[in-house]
Image (cartoon, helix red, strand yellow):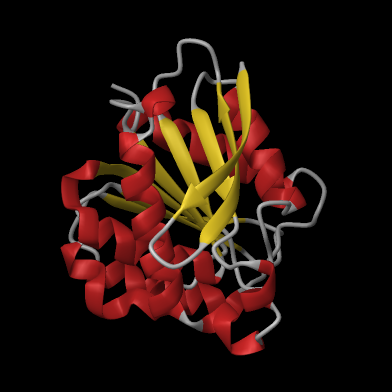
Amino acid sequence: MKKFDIDIPLTSVILKGDLVIPKNATGIVVFSHGSGSSRFSTRNRMVAELIQKQNIGTLLFDLLTEKEDQVYENRFNIDLLVSRLIETTEWLIEYDEVKGLPIGYFGASTGAASALRAAAYFGDTIKAVVSRGGRPDLALSALHQVTAPTLLLVGGMDVPVIEMNKTAFDELHCEKEMKIVPGATHLFEEPGKLLEVADLAINWYKRHLVT
């Protein structure tokens, strides 16, 4: 398994990322984290490690620089976050270590909105999207353009977000599923619930990402 601490050179900034490529990798999942989080998110890293065990690579990266993250409004600037995810994906497509591997997205919270809008932008280039406790409703205007099979995962006790996801689900015209994880709140902090999320995500990637 190869692990890289990488600098991702974009037009205006350089972003930090952690890239892990298992031997004989069959695909790669790019994580788009939620507001106030980073590539060090313990929840995303746990999911990423389980994905890696299935011979699927992962890229966790900071959508904002440290300086940008100090400006609270930037964390909710979906347009900015989408542009960062798009540029990072374009960089990844050309990165020698993963060239040719099918790409999927894993979006958490507001990161799900940027993942879905980027998926709409890339069309068939993105093979699968998973949203964990996401806000896909923040990408409502772009959802009809998403072609990647999309899985929405929501905690059963996260009532407001369930409704937001139902609204978004109706706007998706791609292959799609919405699963409610019983007994889980927004962050899936209850024992075993994040493991359920990882299992559902892995099964989705095995079906749609891995060729």
Residue depicted at x 34% and y 43%: 128
Is 115 located above or below residue 127 in the figure? below
One can see residue 137 in this view: yes
Q: Which residue sits furthest right?
A: 191
Residue depicted at x 82% and y 47%: 191
Residue depicted at x 38% and y 40%: 92
The percent coordinates of residue 98 (x first, y second) are: 40, 27
In the image, is 163 to the left or to the right of 68? left
Is 122 located above or below residue 170 in the figure? above
Residue depicted at x 43% and y 64%: 84
One can see residue 195 in this view: no
The percent coordinates of residue 34 (x first, y second) are: 59, 67
Q: Which of 55 and 14 is in front in this view?
A: 14
Q: Which residue sits furthest top?
A: 24
In the image, is 70 to the left or to the right of 151? right
Quadrant where the N terminus lies? top right
Counting the numbered discs, the total is 0
Is 176 located above or below residue 23 in the figure? below
Q: Within the image, what quadrant is residue 49 found in? A: top right
Q: Within the image, what quadrant is residue 204 found in? A: top left
Quadrant where the C terminus lies? top left
Is 30 located above or below residue 98 in the figure? below
Q: Nearer the viewer, residue 142 or 184?
A: 142
The percent coordinates of residue 56 (x first, y second) are: 49, 25
Q: Within the image, what quadrant is residue 158 found in? A: bottom right
Q: Nearer the viewer, residue 83 or 154?
A: 83
In the image, is 78 to the left or to the right of 161? left
